[in-house]
Amino acid sequence: MRILIVEDDPVLADGLTRSLRAADYAVDCANDGAAADHVLAAQHYDLMILDLGLPKLDGFEVLRRLRRRGSRVPVLVLTARDALDDRVKGLDLGADDYLTKPFDLPELEARVRALIRRGQSGGASVLTHGALALDTAGRRATLNGEPIELSARELGVLEVLMLRSGRVVNKEQLAEQLYGWDEEVGANAIEVYVHRLRRKLEPAGVTIRTIRGLGYLLEKSPHA
Ligand code: CA
């Protein structure tokens, strides 16, 4: 799950980034409206947290351009206290929810979870692959209907592999789904997640093949 934070207050941006990363989201941060507009046109996000008062391009304009491009990314707007007009205008422009500053981080996290769930229920939220099913909205995987224990990052890797099953997925594509721009991705981290997934899935006949030099491929074992 990848989130874009658009906030020009460095202290707030940093606090939000830390708390969402601690909750296992991949987080990117833009500190002005033009940078946000640029990255939104190029990268898929599962949620945007948008401050309205921004340098270069204000939050309303970022939102207007995003919706004009047809994007349905859920947007949580941050507004100043008593700024009723801003809230109304934001919702009219296609924001999904708003939060008044100052806010508590647990409340923000609850809103984030709700919006991501809602955003995902729009598309097919259960991916299946043989006996394996992944509920992307509920963040749960099952094998033959039995829940399997997976960490948030293992679920992230599995989601990408299932979305592209039968095709080779490289490590960069996996890292992109799991990490923000400025997070250090250990060269071995992806290998470790894939290794753990294999151990959990292979007994049920679900095989993740390593294609040397290219990446990974999810395939059903012939015995399945
Ligand atoms: Ca601001």
Image (cartoon, grey):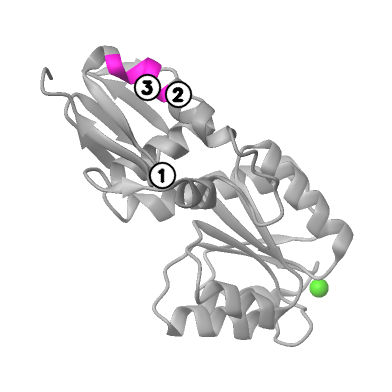
In this view, the mark in front (2 or 1): 1
Q: Secondary structure of the magenta portion, mostly?
A: helix
Residue identified by numbered label 2: 195
Task: Please state which amino acid type lies under the numbered disc 1.
Answer: Gly
Callouts 2 and 1 close, C-beta under 8 Å: no
Residue 136 visible in image: no
**Relative to 75, is 147 above or below?**
above
| Element on which disc 1 rests | loop
Amino acid type of the residue tagged 3 in the rendering? Arg
Q: Provide the residue span drawn in magenta.
A: 197-202
Label ID, residue 198: 3
Check contact, mark 2 vs mark 3: CB within 8 A: yes
Quarter of the picture holding the C terminus: top left
Q: Residue 155: name its quadrant.
A: top left
Three-letter amino acid code at the position of disc 2: His
Q: What element carries label 3?
A: helix
